[in-house]
Amino acid sequence: MKIESKSVRITFLFDVMLNLFASALPIAVLQLFVYPQTAKILGGDKYGLMLTIYSVWILVANAIGNSLNNVKLLRNDEYIKNGLSGDFPILLKRFSCYISVICFFVIWFYFGNFSILHILFGVVVALFIYLKAYFEVGFRINLNYKMIAIINVFLTIGFIIGFGLTSITGYWEFIFLCGYGISCILCILKSGLIFEKSQKTKLYKRTKFEFYSLLAASVIGFLTTYADKLVLYPLIGGTAVSIYYTATILGKIISMITGPLNNVILSYISKWKADKKSILIYVLLFGVILIVIGYFITIIVGGSIIGYLFPQWKEDVLIYLPVTTITVMLQLLISLIYPFTLKYCAMKWQIIFSIIGSIVYFGCALLLWNFYGLMGFCIGTVMGESCKLFVMLLVYKKSK
């Protein structure tokens, strides 16, 4: 029994490290090479617009795809136990249409004019992101993180190819078209989920309810993560978005560990029973140590790295760096706790967490922005994330 337990721990740690590499590679290439070079080509305003549109894609397409992915992961054993197949392809097709319509109008709004090519590119990228996010569950169910790593290597290669096309054509969408397009196709072909039957089963109603509940919570949660760019762009333009995003870029690189750790934790605890709830204490302790170290590393090396990557905004960025890094570190800690609340708390709490956090986030950020400008907005985001973290821990402690 001890040998088996040790083997599971080793496998878990290996999967975390493998998934960390898989997630870190494309993010590092984007943040440290593609984004700085693209900013030089586009200039502050267009670069800010690119970041805003990318936030739209993540908020809409990635939130929906990940929600469907997580529900599929959590309910897969029940479908197998009942000998059922279906439901998820129906939801997948339905929301492909919804995403296309939403992105069409939102991208049109942010561009400020009807550009057929930009809108077409935007909708196609959104669908690639959505499909990739869902079909990856085929590997997560089988704990096949080696394949996820391979897919993300191709995602990285696609980003680099896309940047080459962007530097030639001036269309920044090629970065994401190539990256997500190549990885999405590979994901669909290798996951095996493309052959799943498109039919309703007796579990459809419950599955749909859980998906809608998690989707509502995810969209509201993503709002607090990406609203900075979505709100700031209409308020004070693309250059302000560029400065704000650059102020968070080092913290985001430090927090790259949360995505892979989050996914692996949820993949494993989806198979656990309630008697393992106490492990959150160790994860929380690890998270606190991680964010303290990450914060000081960011502050110490921030000036030099930002001066090298984005020299045009260095002086402005350093003003906001200490505050924006706190926000990113709090998001890191929330992301570590999230799989446990998803597993052990009623689904309704996911919505409540997100609503409370968003109300405080938007209320404080916009109120303080009105009085103190961009610095007030940054402080407001810290207050919103702090409130969400507190509520999550409180509800988790009270849950049975």
Image: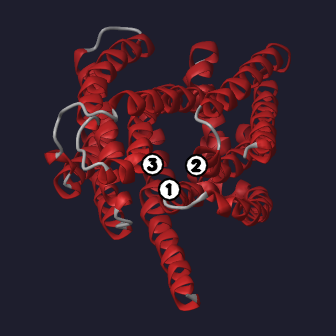
> Helix or strand or loop: what does disc 3 sit on?
helix
Q: Amino acid at mark 1?
A: Ser
Q: In the rendered view of the protein, which quadrant contains the N terminus?
A: bottom right
Question: Which residue matches tag 1?
Answer: 270
Q: Amino acid at mark 2?
A: Lys
> Helix or strand or loop: what does disc 2 sit on?
helix
Q: Earlier in the sequence, mark 3 or mark 1?
A: 3
> Helix or strand or loop: what does disc 1 sit on?
loop
Marks 2/1: CA–CA distance: 7 Å
Marks 3/2: CA–CA distance: 8 Å
Question: Which residue matches tag 3?
Answer: 74
Do the residues under discs 3 and 2 have CB atoms within 8 angstroms? yes
- Taking the spot 28% from the left edge, 25% from the top edge, the residue there is 123
Q: Earlier in the sequence, mark 2 or mark 1?
A: 1
Q: Tell me: residue 277, above or below residue 100.
A: below
Question: Which residue matches tag 2?
Answer: 343
Q: Earlier in the sequence, mark 3 or mark 2?
A: 3
- Taking the spot 74% from the left edge, 43% from the top edge, the residue there is 399
Q: Amino acid at mark 3?
A: Leu
